[in-house]
Amino acid sequence: MGVHGKACIVTGAARGIGEATARALAAGGAGVVLVDRREELLAEVASSVGDAAIAVAADVTTEEGWADVVGATLGALGRVDVLVNNAGIIRVRALVDTDLELFRRVLDTNLVSAFLGLRAVAPVMQDQGGGVVINLSSPQGLEGREGMSAYTASKFGVRGLTRTAAIELGPIGVRVNCVVPGPTRTAMTARDGWSDDDYDRAYGGYPLGRMGAPEEIAAVIAFLASDEASFCTGADFVVDGGVLAGKPRS
């Protein structure tokens, strides 16, 4: 795909969808800056991705963290063509038991980081004549779910942020889209003691009857980052195995 030579930033890149995305972009010939707070794990992943990968340990919920990320990217690659706002956390807790600190932590990680990232790269992309931003939402960005008040609020917010950013940044040549991954086998979604059969049973009623692999989500992200997606902006790209198609089969 048309990502060869592009300078890309991927947040939450130490594992899961972020790691798979960094590998997919690097395999396509892009230079990739992998960003995460888990410094040792991040360094290992960056090393295995290859010479085109750079590790930057940073807190993307802060303006200072984003200044470090953008500065490192410009220093190493000279430009910023693609930003993938993938950093995210899930906390499952009833609404009345969710304290303000937890609610804010989820929103900061999932939504505020994407806002700060957009704001940090937009001037750089404008000076270059364009760029691409891809935000990560969730099926819980389109429907509610018990015990996920903070998570659903953050993921609905990501979709709204994406649309407004697409409207505002389109005239300067920046495309902004949202990928909506369904249930994906990652460390974040792992359940203690579950076997492969347990995961298959949990999602067996949905159209494809299984969880997705991080590489399947990364493939769609890589497409949106590429020149082939040049007329795509302000949209949701759902990669969920049919979870949002309707209720599971009985």
Image: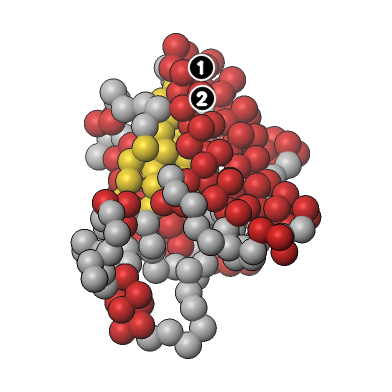
Q: Secondary structure at mark 1?
A: helix
Residue 85 at what x, y percent from top left? 52, 43
* Tally of marks: 2
Can you see residue 191?
Answer: yes
Q: Secondary structure at mark 2?
A: helix
The circle drawn on residue 223 is none
Left or right placement of residue 82 versus residue 105 in this view: left
Residue 105 at what x, y percent from top left? 71, 53
Q: Which of 34/109 is in front?
A: 109
Q: Which residue is mark 2?
A: 165
What quarter of the picture does the C terminus occupy?
A: bottom left
Left or right placement of residue 25 versus residue 57 in this view: left
Residue at position x 32%, y 63% from top?
A: 212
Residue at position x 32%, y 52% from top?
A: 244
Structural crowding at the residue carrying mark 1, measured as other residues with C-alpha within 10 Å and reported as few (<14), some (14–19) or many (≥20): few
**Amino acid carrying mark 1 in the image:** Glu
Residue 126 at what x, y percent from top left? 52, 17
Dividing the picture into quadrants, the one containing residue 225 is top left
**Amino acid carrying mark 2 in the image:** Ala
Separation of marks 1 and 2 at Cα, in angstroms = 5 Å
From the viewer's perspective, is residue 203 above or below residue 158?
Answer: below
Dividing the picture into quadrants, the one containing residue 248 is bottom left
Q: Which of 44/133 is in front?
A: 133
Q: Which of 83/177 is in front?
A: 177
Structural crowding at the residue carrying mark 2, measured as other residues with C-alpha within 10 Å and reported as few (<14), some (14–19) or many (≥20): many
What quarter of the picture does the N terminus occupy?
A: top left
Residue at position x 35%, y 75% from top?
A: 202
Can you see residue 60?
Answer: no
Q: Which residue is mark 1?
A: 168
The answer to the question of whether label 1 and label 2 lie on touching residues, with beta carbons closer than 8 A, is yes
Residue 3 at what x, y percent from top left? 33, 37
